[in-house]
Amino acid sequence: MEYFIPSPKKGSESKAKVISRRAFALTSFKFVFMAMVVSRLFYLQIIKRDEFIIKADKNRFRKWKLAPSRGLILDKNDNIIADNFQVFKIALIPNEIRSIDNFLSSFSKILPITNNEISYYKKKYKVHNKNLPFVLDKNLNWNEFSRLNYVIHNIQGAQPFMSYERTYMHPNEFAHILGYVSTPNQKDLNQIDTNYAGVPNLKVGKIGLEKNSNKSLLGTPGSAIYEVNAFGKRVKNVEKIDGINGSRIKTSIDKDIQIYAYQQLKEKSGSVVVMNMYGRVLCCVSSPSYDPNKFTYGISYKDYDVLKKNEKKPLINKAMTTTYPPASTFKMIVALSALENKIITKNFRHTCKGKVDLYEQRYHCWKEKGHGRVNLKRAIKESCDIYFYEVARLLGIDRLQKTAFRFGLGDYVFQDFFEEAKGLVPSTSWKREALGKSWYLGETMISGIGQGYIKTTNVQLCKMITQFANGGYQINASFFDSSDLALGKKIIEDDEHIELILKSLFEATNHPGGTSYRSRIAGAMKLAGKTGTAQVRKISESQREQDLKNKDLPWKFRDHSLFTGYGPADNPKYAISVIIEHGGSGSAVAAPIARNIMAKIFEKERKLNNV
């Protein structure tokens, strides 16, 4: 019996083959897919295991750098003049913030911030380095800080922290010499160690001693590691490494004298500098002043604009940055240079008739009818201009410059103070190179009374008079206290020349007819010194005929008032220089201020010695 085997229909065999191929392809895809999944899991869990453990830990742990406490600044008697106060602040972590607008909106619901503050923060955040924490210029009190920590999980990217903020104990009195600190810019960061990158609330010195000694004051940052939950809230302290506080700096400044000198200026525009005979600065005051604490904690645009627009320039350190004609205080240099170059002797006399003509140009003495026949001592004592016109004419500007250079004029007094001006002592070659013009004899004559091109700072004048008072020895001026006190080389040729000039300065302050006689100090400890009145404008003959008084002129056209001196006169220990911008006569304004300050110093000296 044969069985019937039906033959397949046409095309069915090809369909089976297609289905078989599809099943094979699908199965192969599944195996490939599974192989990819397994290989990926192997890659992630075995090969990249350590890397992802680190990343997971980074999500679970936060490393936070800790700003060190800035070093204290002390006066010579160990009084703190720059301290640090504990503050509570909040930082934004840029890589955790999606929108600064949303962040500030959420933050304002927890702690009150004004619309102006929000706008200010937005502007600063826009230009902020997003690799660094952005610290809000806002100090929180303890209640605000506690409340913020309680709800921190509701604000993504916020990090409350405790830090220290530089605080000045006598802000206005010490503003210009201490300077201030502020948030570092990129240039500042490039000048310090890379360890400081990312330190929240880091502040660096911007001017003054804060900048000059920034590396010593900074200290070394610490760090802390915290475990956080999914909301970024701290749940446990894992590790803390304390930083190293900045070094203490002891200055030579006397806090009491500094404060008293500032009070004496009474918002006048000017400065006072006091040194001992070795060049240690006891006082360096500039007025009007400002509050550097506002720069530390964040000064408003409005307050800063007021300071910038003030015509008396409170932001400028007038003791070191501003230059002035030294006026008659320069006559000591002229006298010494003429004596050393044998242009004159101590007995050289000249007649002053109140004016002198040279090549159709008239030169006047401050005393209209003249001083008559005067010698060197009397010319210094009564500040005769005609006498020093003649001495300068005979001496010449080039020899005068060399003597001025030896006493520190036309050069920096300190080191590494970028705000200090160099001043200028001219010469024939200087004018040719700087202005492309020839030097004129008339310019030499007015240089003889400290006018014309010559410009000095107040610290230069104080250094100059100190070197006269200590017997003609060079000093290395400094703001830092040191037991290593030593005088430099001798910068004069003959002690008799210095003795003659010092006797003249003593008579100028303590004998009738002297320009600062009204500012003498009674008692055993006496002041000696020289006044100066620096013109800031050229006076025409018609103006002289009108006899315009200084007080009748607009403030900016009035003469500067100067005084340089030392004391006690018989055994010099301190030198002082006072400049009052547009103050008028040196004998009427600067000299009385110098007298009061030196009297205060003498009083402290007597108490110290139980006299």
Image (cartoon, rainbow, N blue to C red):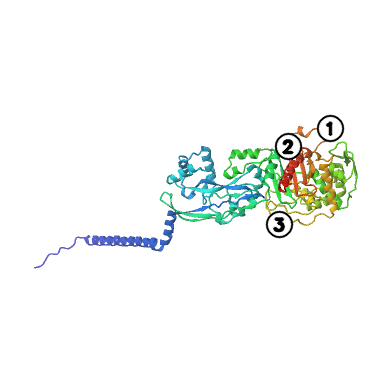
Of 535 and 72, nearer the camera is: 72
Quarter holding the N terminus is bottom left
Say what secondary structure mark 3 lies in.
loop
The quadrant in which residue 523 appears is: top right
Q: Residue 259: where, in percent of width, then height?
A: 67, 43
Marks 1, 3: nearer the viewer:
3
Of 459 and 566, nearer the camera is: 566
Within-10-Å neighbours for mark 2: few <14, some 14–19, many 20+: some
Question: Where is mark 3, residue-wise?
Answer: 484
Question: Where is mark 1, residue-wise?
Answer: 545
Say what secondary structure mark 1 lies in.
helix
Residue type at tag 3 = Asp
Of labels 2 and 3, earlier in sequence is 3
Within-10-Å neighbours for mark 1: few <14, some 14–19, many 20+: few
Query: For the image shown, how many numbered marks are present on the structure?
Result: 3
* Residue found farthest to the front: 610
Q: Which mark is residue 556?
A: 2
Disc 2 to disc 3, how far (Cα)?
A: 44 Å
Disc 1 to disc 3, how far (Cα)?
A: 57 Å
Residue type at tag 1 = Glu
Horizontal side of 74 relative to 144 (left or right) equals right
Of labels 1 and 3, earlier in sequence is 3
Marks 2, 3: nearer the viewer:
3
The quadrant in which residue 372 appears is: top right
